[in-house]
Image (cartoon, coloured by chain):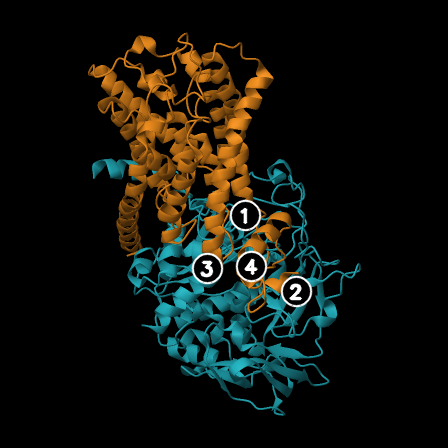
Chain colours: A cyan, B orange
Amino acid sequence: MCVWKILFIFASSLNSAVVGEKIFKIRRGLDLPVAGSAEPVVEPFAAARYCIRPSDFRWMKVQLLAHEGDVLQVGDPLFADKRDARVRICSPVAGTLRQIVRGEKRCIRALVIEPDEKQRTSRDVEIPFRLQDANAWQVREVLLQYGLWPALRQRPFSIIANPDDMPRAIFVSCFDSAPLAPDFRVLLQDCEPEWLEGIRVLQSSCPGIPIHLGLRSGSDNSLFEATEGVRLHYFHGPHPAGNVGTQIDFIAPMEKGDVVWYIHPQHVVWMGRLFLHHLLSSERRVAITGPAESHPRYVSTTFGADLDSLLAPDPQGRAVRNIGGNLLTGILLDEFPAAGFYDTQITRILEGGQREFLGWLLPGLKKWSRSHTYTAWMSRRHFPFTTSMQGGERALVMSDVYDDVFPMDFLPAELLKACIAKDVEKMEELGIYSVDSEDFALCEVVCPSKMPWQQIIEEALYYIHDNK
Amino acid sequence: MAALFGKGKPLHAFQALFDAVDTFLLTPSSVTRNGCHVRDAVDMKRIMITVMFALCPALLFGWWNVGYQHFLSAGVDPAFWPAFGYGFLQWLPMAVVVYAVGLGIEVCFAQWRGHEVAEGFFVTGFLIPMIMPPDVPLWILAVATAFSVVFAKEVFGGTGYNFLNPAIVARVFVFFAYPSVISGDKVWIAHPGMSDAVSGATPLAMESVAQIPSNWDLFVGAIPGCIGETCKIAILMGALLLAFTKVADWRIMLSVMVGGVAMAALFNAVGMTEVPVLTQLLMGGFLFGAVFMATDPVTAAHTRAGKYVYGLLVGLVAIMIRVLNKGYVEGMMLAILLMNIMAPLIDYCVVQIHIRRRKRRITQSKHEKV
């Protein structure tokens, strides 16, 4: 057994992160060479309609609280979670609920709201206590009442946090490392008081629970460093350094039974705004990015705003895919091109699917590949990414390419196999509870077998959740 | 045209074949839907073609060497092009038979299962003629290929699900089922002539160290042997390409070498063999096996730590078989096959250690927080 241990320690010494002076250096990962980051220009935007998609909220069973034709104020409840009716999603805008669009098996695809003439996206509210005097349950009740609770999500499962839980810790990733990710300095510009108040709201709702902020080492973190009562952790390296799953695993790895919460800084600002200014507003910034966007920029709007008028067609008439979120984890926007509740980014990319004669044999000078089987390694330029699958789906053959893009202390291929086999015990032992499908996005990108890694992981998580 | 091959259409029975030819000629038109919207350009076809490129130097040299050995044994002065052409013509029917039989079976299974034809056999079919004696009867080659494709791969689910390397299974099948065609003095030369001027035995079969060619001759490879295994320079070129493109894991290649050196040195130290360490590595199919066979990502250990152990044991066992059992002179194929069987066990141990270590890390992390 001793030999095993020595060999294992040797292999582990090549591990992806070293801890020293509070900086986690991540070596295994990948930044896609794709063009189209947003310029730091923020434009205000008033949408002609708002589309709220229940599918933004993972596995939520929808219980409608509003009906077609209802006149809504900002913060009026639209629907709740059947499992816990306290968890509600509220209208981001004042207007009329024009349509409830249903899909297969009558599932609700979207609630379409037509804003009123004044385009009101905020409302003054009464909060009957001072934050410093309030107990955790009072604070949570206000967040639930005004539809801000869904901003808090939990691991395991990446679902909306249970309002009755007390988590082990709260994690806030203060940078996004995904391709073409928005700059948090732009997202949170002029929001310092609200941010600080928002953190106090979190502290009041979970007294004594540590709040961990994950920061990008070497960038301007003055806003976050000014926050009191939180623990700062610095991360250095490529994506997925900014994923909250990565940060959880490096800071405080989880096991079965642990629950941690996480939240996006923009949502912290929403909470701060509510308690500091008594203003209910889901105003936030969204980056419109991508190689198929001629004018990458930020827009200031609310969640659910239909961005269709902003998304200009390709000048050369090519098909463009609009993605709600980033290239790795976003959802395909078709009928309702609105930024979802958790999205801070829209990515636009050309549709692929063009067939190429003997494409697997040619040098492929314009093809990007992390492996050295194409010539991309010689170039540092951006590549013309499209949505082409670039191959057919096969069984898992190359078992180790995933380790190079997966920084956490995991065996990704082994976990995937356990997920495919629905071997819950093995999944638990291999750490399924602290990860989400997004953590495996890079494995999916580089997979030569073109396996749907994220789908497999999400289905496995659902299987565990459903059979609990 | 594709519509003719759809379900319920007249040519549906040939859909797998149509898909294989279609995606061979043109890249698939499929696009991503959910999950990642962009994908790496590498796919299984690209990986397999890279392995075939890596095998090319050894194959080209093999063509020449087959002809060279033939003319040499016939007592004829071996000129370059005639030797090359002779070797090529010797290899061509072998390749045709292997691909016809193997791909035929693969296509049938793919059609039966409703899958696409996997690319794994392109490499397997490339490897099989390279590790056979140049004179092996074609019907034996066909039977061996059919046996390996069906019983080493398809019964388990096809490429990606097999736990034994199909090319090695084909060779082992011939070795045990038809020992006369793969052992003895003369089998390693194609249609040897009657001249006694040149010995036809492979270095492995030579009992006295003095008979073994010099290390330089072994390295260059103009000696009798399988088509692909003799030239170590060509194999090293392939190894460089595979390691650089990350198609094969350098960790396995390195650890096989380390295992081989360790075992050869041990046997030398205790006086069980007089063959020097370097000669052991250069003889027979050791290097070819280390570079092209042991690194098969499906049948090797899958975990990174496991790969070191797997490679090390392949090297150790190969030399052990070679030295201790004179009957099985080519220990490499048996060592790889044995370790193919052991690889899941190695992975199991690595995963268990990982799980235990992970638990310890979590406990430690919680303790620190308190």
Quadrant in which residue A330 is drawn = bottom right
Q: Amino acid at mark 2?
A: Asn
Labels 2 and 1 positioned on one and the same chain: no
Q: Residues within 10 Å of mark 1 (few under 14, many from 20)?
A: many
* Mark 4 to mark 1 CA distance (whole Å): 21 Å
Secondary structure at badge 3 equals helix
Image: B293 above or below B36: above
The residue identified by callout 3 is B112
Can residue A438 be seen here?
no
Q: Amino acid at mark 3?
A: Trp
Which chain does the numbered disc 4 sit on? B
Q: Amino acid at mark 1?
A: Asp
Point out which mark residue A322 bears: 2
Q: Nearer the viewer, residue A376 or A89?
A: A376
Going by the picture, which residue comes out furthest to the front?
B194
* Mark 3 to mark 1 CA distance (whole Å): 24 Å
* Mark 4 to mark 2 CA distance (whole Å): 34 Å
Select label 4 or label 1 by which is in front. 4
Labels 3 and 2 positioned on one and the same chain: no
Q: Residue at x 56, y 86 (%)?
A: A76
* Mark 4 to mark 3 CA distance (whole Å): 10 Å
